[in-house]
Amino acid sequence: MVVGEIRETFCIYSDSIGNEMGTIGIGDTGLVIKTTIGENYMVPYEYVKSVVTEGGVTLGKMKAVLVFHDVMGDRHELVFMASDMKLAELKRACEK
């Protein structure tokens, strides 16, 4: 599955201390999610069910929950922190 050219990639964090848990790439037709524990997903935008921010945690970082389905139909929920600017770009790309 191809999600087109990746326009933007940003780091996601597991906590407010800044422990990196992976990256999210924003492509032409979907997302590429790579985690530090080896889970990798290519997610077309139509498979993204929601992107919800849960408020600020530290300077410029917000907690978020990304709910999506993989190509096999399994539901995934990714809880992470990222900069508020990157989360706004993610929401705009997914139109959620």
Image (cartoon, rainbow, N blue to C red):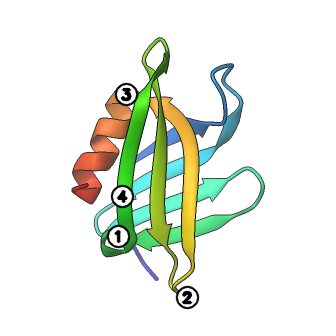
Q: What element carries label 4?
A: strand
CB atoms of marks 4 and 1 within 8 Å: no
Q: What element carries label 2?
A: loop
CB atoms of marks 2 and 3 within 8 Å: no
The residue where tag 1 is placed is 4
Q: x%, y% of residue 35?
A: 67, 53
> Is 26 rendered above or below residue 80?
below
> Which of the labelled discs sits on residue 84, or is there none?
3
Distance from label 2 to label 3 (Cα)?
31 Å
Q: Nearer the viewer, mark 2 or mark 1?
A: 2
Of pointers 4 and 1, the one earlier in the residue sequence: 1
Residue type marked 3:
Asp
Q: Kindly identify the residue that appears in the image at 37 percent across and 28 percent down.
A: 84
Residue type marked 4:
Ser
Of pointers 3 and 1, the one earlier in the residue sequence: 1
Distance from label 3 to label 4 (Cα)?
16 Å
Distance from label 4 to label 1 (Cα)?
21 Å
Distance from label 4 to label 2 (Cα)?
18 Å
Q: Is mark 1 on a helix, strand or loop?
A: loop
Q: Can residue 42 be seen in this view?
A: yes
